[in-house]
């Protein structure tokens, strides 16, 4: 690396933005070039001085309060009421479902839950939690090319994501959850006003099970199947035939 | 030689927006999630959790850009309200760069309204001679003097002034990099410029600051 190259890479070097090879090239050059070494030191000092001494202007104490009250005011005034979706009945339903799920958990602890019931329980809890907290998705997008990479970047596998808008099940987004002691992907779809959560994770040693297993608990319908080494669990408050439609459409599109 | 690991535009910082020109200006695509809009209280809560925690950063950038306390208050407040309006387009992740982009847009709106006479003067003065960063014949003295100066008690004032005097497009890059610790990719997304431009502005801004510091030292 010569002086010109070193100068042009110097800032990337100081900011830790260079790849290791280029970084090593800069270091190698300044060892043998006093001028470049001096420049690097000056910039490094300047950087240190800025971080140490440049005033950081924190927001005045009353500004946060003022903005908070403005935010509340404008949210109240600007709200387009008719278009707003009323979550209250769903939250109540979810709260009741969660209570029921809890009771069910307590009940099955008396008996011995099957492995499948254990998973169903976790899926119900995950779904209820997202409904109660009003947080359907971590990444909200109807674009499968946004949702899939986002999920892949957070997980050690890449779930099959397909937008099924044309079939009446638009993609809402995706989120992460934790089932069977591992992070799993949750694909969020919508059908009319109903949310469908599809939990997906790799399941070692699972054969393709073309037949879907059906479960109904606490007012939710669940469908589970495995395909290409992945476990799929769909859950919704949709009625059972419609959920089955969804599963069929998804499995066919995937 | 190009910068092997930092080329290209800053796509992917805000996966929500295909073109980050939409921030704080117009948002053309509200998504299918409209029917999922949460009720007001919940939205405000999520908004405050995600965005209001970065108010200091918003104010700091506004203050450094406008260089005026009252203006900074107005800009930070306007930016927060804009952020609330466009909160539906925010798709999670760190809201700080997202908010800072809105602050920046709010600042330029404010500038047009309040200082229409503000000229955009490209900063071209005595820096053409500085392409070699003072390595030309300055010798050891330059280095010593800057080091000495930065160790002085009033280094805070000196640094403040050197930064304050930078033209805004350079000042903002330094503030984002050194005070907000944003990566090149994030800065590129916030300022809506290619990463290569972030690099060149940063390098230029630092050289300008060193020139100022040397001048200060010569005058003292």
Image (cartoon, grey):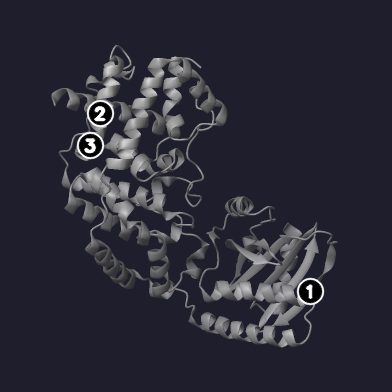
The image quadrant of residue B87 is bottom left
Neighbor class of circle 1 (other Cα within 10 Å; few <14, some 14-19, many 20+) is few
Real-space Cα separation, disc 1 to disc 3, in angstroms:
66 Å
Tell me the quarter of the picture where residue B115 sits.
Answer: top left
Q: How many marks?
A: 3
Residue under label 3: B155
The 10 Å Cα crowd at callout 3, few under 14, some 14 to 19, many 20 or more, is some
Please report the residue visible at 31 percent of the width from the left and 71 percent of the height from the top: A72
Q: Which residue is mark 1?
A: A115
> Is residue B111 left or right of B135 when viewed as pictured?
left
Q: Which mark is on residue B121?
A: none
The residue positioned 78% from the left and 61% from the top of the image is A203
Please tell me whether mark 3 or mark 2 is closer to you in this view.
2
Q: Is residue A103 left or right of residue B49?
A: right
The answer for which chain carries disc 3 is B
The residue located at (14%, 24%) in the rendering is: B219
Q: Would you say residue A61 is visible in this rendering?
A: yes
- The secondary structure type at the circle numbered 2 is helix
């Amino acid at each position: 690396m010569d002086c010109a190259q070193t100068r042009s890479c110097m800032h990337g070097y100081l900011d830790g933005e260079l790849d290791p090879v280029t970084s090593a090239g800069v270091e190698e050059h300044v060892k043998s070039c006093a001028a470049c070494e001096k420049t690097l030191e000056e910039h490094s000092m300047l950087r240190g001085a800025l971080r140490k001494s440049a005033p950081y202007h924190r927001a005045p104490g009353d500004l946060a309060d003022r903005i908070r009250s403005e935010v509340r005011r404008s949210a109240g005034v600007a709200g387009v009421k008719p278009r707003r979706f009323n979550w209250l009945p769903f939250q109540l339903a979810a709260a009741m479902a969660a209570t029921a799920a809890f009771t069910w958990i307590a009940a099955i602890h008396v008996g011995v839950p099957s492995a499948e019931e254990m998973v169903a329980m976790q899926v119900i809890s995950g779904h209820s939690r997202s409904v109660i907290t009003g947080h359907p998705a971590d990444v909200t997008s109807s674009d499968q090319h946004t949702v899939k990479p986002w999920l892949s970047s957070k997980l050690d596998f890449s779930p099959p994501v397909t937008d099924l808008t044309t079939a009446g099940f638009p993609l809402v987004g995706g989120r992460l959850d934790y089932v069977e002691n591992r992070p799993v992907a949750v694909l969020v779809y919508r059908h009319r006003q109903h949310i469908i959560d599809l939990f997906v994770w790799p399941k070692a040693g699972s054969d393709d099970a073309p037949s879907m297993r059906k479960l109904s608990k606490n007012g939710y319908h669940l469908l589970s199947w495995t395909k290409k080494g992945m476990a799929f669990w769909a859950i919704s408050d949709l009625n059972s035939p419609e959920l089955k439609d969804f599963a069929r459409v998804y499995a066919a599109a995937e | 030689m190009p910068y092997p690991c930092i080329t290209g535009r800053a796509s992917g910082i805000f996966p929500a927006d295909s073109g980050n020109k939409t921030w704080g200006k117009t948002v053309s695509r509200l998504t299918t999630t409209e029917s999922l809009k949460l009720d007001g209280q919940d939205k405000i809560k999520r908004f405050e959790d995600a965005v209001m925690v970065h108010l200091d950063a918003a104010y700091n950038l506004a203050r450094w850009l406008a260089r005026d306390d009252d203006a900074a208050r107005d800009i930070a407040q306007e930016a927060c309200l804009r952020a609330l309006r466009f909160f539906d387009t925010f798709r999670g992740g760190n809201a700080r760069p997202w908010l800072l982009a809105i602050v920046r847009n709010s600042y330029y709106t404010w500038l047009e309204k309040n200082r229409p006479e503000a000229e955009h003067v490209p900063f071209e003065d005595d820096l053409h001679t500085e392409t070699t960063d003072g390595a030309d014949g300055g010798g050891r003295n330059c280095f010593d003097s800057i080091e000495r100066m930065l160790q002085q008690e009033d280094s805070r004032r000196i640094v403040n002034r050197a930064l304050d005097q930078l033209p805004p497009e350079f000042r903002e890059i330094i503030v984002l990099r050194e005070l907000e610790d944003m990566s090149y990719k994030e800065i590129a997304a916030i300022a809506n410029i290619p990463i290569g431009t972030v690099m060149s502005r940063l390098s230029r801004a630092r050289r300008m600051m060193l020139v100022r510091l040397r001048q200060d030292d010569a005058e003292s």
